[in-house]
Amino acid sequence: MANVDTEPKWYILHTYSGYEAMVKESLLRLIENNNLQDSIVDVKIPTEQTIEEKANGKKKVVERKLLPCYVFIKMIYSNQIWYLVTNTRGVTGFCGPQGRPIPMKEEEIRRLRLEEYVADADFEVGDRVAIDNGPLEGFVGTIREINPETQRAKVSIVMFGRQQDVEVEYVQMQKVPEGAETPEQSES
């Protein structure tokens, strides 16, 4: 009896070091050659851009993998798909017990930004928000400007004892309920 899901879910694949891009390309070819567009929906390698300083003093923007040796795949799980994916060159297996995949949780998908969330912009200028993702995680501030096209807001936070305006994506923040105590209120 085949174990089959009906909704595509995100799973984590472990790969050999440095094989992430090759595994992604191989999986995309596998999807196209075997007409698996309905079973394997997406393949991603989360990256971030960082600035590196070279020996000559010049700075360069570099694309760096967030999680080396891992590729993320959104698929409808079945034994056949499991077999095809695990037999792809460079793949060591799925992350899970005995190499059987476990679907990722919604908060993990959001944190890694595997999917573009269209957040309902129920934010308004003047709202108190808590930043729950990214380099400013843990900060609480007040929305100064909203840009619905880019789904970003300018948020005023206290950093190093000074008021600072920073740009934050909608998916990186949550409204602070009225009357809720924030970390900066509990310090005073």
Image (spheres, rainbow, N blue to C red):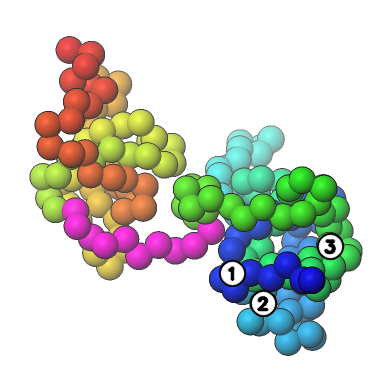
| CA distance separating discs 3 and 1 | 17 Å
List the residue tagged with mark 3. Answer: 86
Check disc 1 and report the residue beneath it.
8
The first of marks 2 and 1 along the sequence is: 1
Which of the two marks, 3 or 1, is nearer to us in this view? 1
Q: Secondary structure at mark 3?
A: helix
Q: Are marks 2 and 1 in contact (CB under 8 Å)?
A: yes
Quick check: can you spot residue 30?
yes
Where in the figure is residue 157, as x and y percent of width and height? 24, 33
Q: Which mark is residue 39?
A: 2
| Corner quadrant of residue 29 | bottom right
Residue at the top extreme?
A: 188
Counting residues from the start of the chain, the first of labels 3 and 1 encountered is 1
At mark 1, the secondary structure is loop
Q: Position of residue 169 (x, y in %)?
A: 34, 52
Residue at x 43%, y 37% (from the top left corner): 135
Residue at horizontal 73 percent and vertical 49 percent from the top:
95
Which amino acid is tagged 1? Pro
Q: Residue at x 73, y 87 (%)?
A: 35
Alpha-carbon span between mark 3 and mark 2: 15 Å
Q: From the image, which quarter does the N terminus lie in?
A: bottom right
Graded by Cα atoms within 10 Å as few (under 14), some (14 to 19) or many (20 or more), the crowding at tag 3 reads: some
| Span shown in magenta | 114-123
